Image (spheres, rainbow, N blue to C red):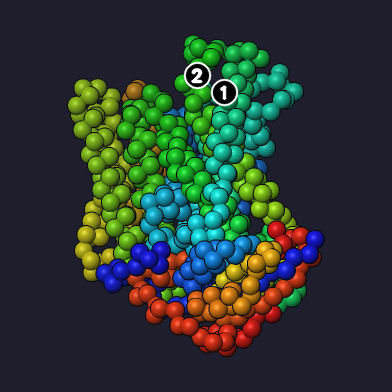
Amino acid sequence: MSARQLLGFFDDEQDILDATRAVRRNGFVVSDVYAPYAVHGLDKAMGLQPSKLPRVCFALGLLGAALKVWFEIWTSAVDWPINVGGKPLNSLPAFVPVTFEVMVLFAGMSTVFAFVLVARLYPGRRATPPDPAVSDYRFVLVIDETDAAFDPEVLHKLLRKFRVRAIEERVTTDQESAR
Amino acid sequence: MASASSALRPPLIAGEKTPAQVTKDICSVLDSKPTALWWSGFLVSLAFLLLGVVAVTYQVAVGIGTWGLNSTVGWAFDITNFVFWVGIGHAGTLISAVLFLLRQQWRTSVNRAAEAMTIFAVICAGIFPVIHMGRPWLAHWMIPYPNMRGPLWVNFRSPLVWDFFAILTYFTISLTFWYVGMLPDLATIRDRAEPGFRKKLFGVLALGWDGSYRTWIRYETLYKLLAGLGTPLVISVHTIVSWDFATSVIPGWHTTIFPPYFVAGAIFSGMSMVLTLMIVARKTMGLEDYITVGHLEKMAKLTLAVSLMVGLAYLTEVFTALYSGNPYEQFAFANRMFGPLGWAYWIMVTCNVGISQLFWFRQVRTHWGAVFCIAILANVGMWFERFVIIVSSLERDFLPSSWADYTPTSIEVATLLGSFGLFFTCFLLFCRFVPVIAISEVKGVLNVGRRREAPPVISASPQPNPAEGEGVPA
């Protein structure tokens, strides 16, 4: 699928923040913003939903802890019960530290894997930032030209209010950059 | 961040930097050839590392008779070094996770290096229990895997097994946290590098990071979650290390104060090590604008605060022994202070609680030389703390007939020196290959304490970036 996009290039976090807000307020569709660092409040300006990663973290942490408790009980009290110093075979309080560590390990690692999955990051992925300076100092506002009411004139005027460095139109056929 | 700036707040980063300058300042160190100072440091560290390799090979080949241990003192140098290095690591997590959750933005200048320090310190720490096993080729028996010995499972009631899980989890999570935190910076290096091997390598390491904000928001969430997990983790790890001692019945070890006491001590030694490394890094790599005197001062204040906690723990320990009415406990502390290892006890008290009180003075906190010396002494003191706790409690136990003294052998000392060699070799390599300062995080706090820029000027045509002299992007 090909998509026409209008790109605005900015050099200041305040400008990109204000421009993103203004562009959305005027009814344009912000496809994405490229930024060299996390700008506080940009997610709200773009209208992005909060990430669902905390759910993965919680669920997998709980799963890890549950599996570990089961494993500790099974190895210590079922599979090969050994009397150590007369302590009960199923010594739940003594299982707490390892259960905690495994919970943290599961929660942490699964969240990282979930992150690279949803963000589609993997070794060998070709990075296609709209400007190579995105990882240096440049902010790029990508606006979809989807609407029939899309008016480049209005948009140009709007972006210039926020000290846009350059404006470009691009047609992409690449799914990667169009997402 | 920008909207929170006020005239009253001092800037975190000196020199009115722009994001482009930050990239250049921090990456240029990696582009140039290593200096003579770096080479000399690296070669000395490597020499110590080789000494350690020789010592470890020798003691594994010959056996544990090469140590100064005897049937009374069964734990000494290895365990001291293990606890010492794990403790060093804790400040890295404190800075990267706890200070992140507490919104301490000054951490951005030091967190990368502190996290690296954590990883290398935990590697150093992990080696000692393996050596201490005496038969390190059976180390994998600590893993509860289905085996041909029954299967015989590990004893999950044992603090030594807890320790194994704690250290491995801590290492894995710290390494992941460090790597994830580095993703945007790896992309920066990739985009700066000339086409070739380096660009390809960093391209693979950066996982195709392109700065899309949809990725950034997930990344921020991930970072917050890892920080949230790292905070209880770091407390649990040293708590579990202290349980190695506290769950035994040795006087001087069997106390409930050990977990907070150990955690405070760990953070104290770790903060001192961060200070040491940061002072060296800012001087040798020209990072004075990023790691400012303000950073040193803040870290010195933190060090002072934990030093007071450590002092409180020392006092509480003695009081508990006196008040317990337990003659063994009372003797253990009298022996600790005035027994054969009394000199080590007083080194510990002087370095950890005495000298660090100089940090009350602003002139001391802001003088890098003074901070450096105090930080080094604090680490000496913290090493002795572990040595005193472990050896003084063991060498005078319940039966005077079994009392014995412990003296380390040259092999044990060489192993300790080797661990320092390993630590500094890793750290110096880290300084050469990845940015020592979290570039993307520093860019985010550039506006702190700076005046807001003039309101947007409406210009007719796109302007080239005056700072870069670069026109329309590619």
Q: Which chain carries label 2?
A: A
Whether tag 1 and tag 2 are in contact, CB under 8 A, the answer is: yes
Quick one: label 1 or label 2, which is nearer the N terminus? Answer: 1
Q: Tell me the residue that label 2 is attached to.
A: A92
Q: In this view, does B432 lie to the left or right of A120?
A: left
Rounded to the nearest angstrom, the CA distance separating label 1 from label 2 is 8 Å
What residue is drawn where x is 28% and y is 51%?
A: B305
Who is closer to the viewer here, A165 or B277? A165
Where the N terminus of chain B falls, by quadrant? Answer: bottom left
Question: Label 2 amino acid?
Answer: Leu
What residue is drawn where x is 60% and y is 71%?
A: A140
Q: Tell me the residue that label 1 is attached to.
A: A69
Does residue B245 show up?
yes
Who is closer to the viewer here, B68 or B320? B320
Q: Is residue B312 left or right of residue A59?
A: left
Residue B103: % across, % down? 39, 55
Residue B414: % across, % down? 52, 52
Q: In this view, does B98 lie above or below A45?
A: above
Residue B59: % across, % down? 60, 44
Q: In this view, does A100 lie above or below A175?
A: above
Where the C terminus of chain B falls, by quadrant? Answer: bottom right
Mark 2 Cα shell of 10 Å, populated few (<14), some (14-19), many (≥20) = some
Examine the image and state in which quarter residue B169 appears: top right
Q: Do labels 1 and 2 share a chain?
A: yes
Mark 1 Cα shell of 10 Å, populated few (<14), some (14-19), many (≥20) = some
What residue is drawn where x is 50% and y is 60%?
A: A45
Examine the image and state in which quarter residue A136 appears: bottom right
Examine the image and state in which quarter residue B450 appears: bottom left
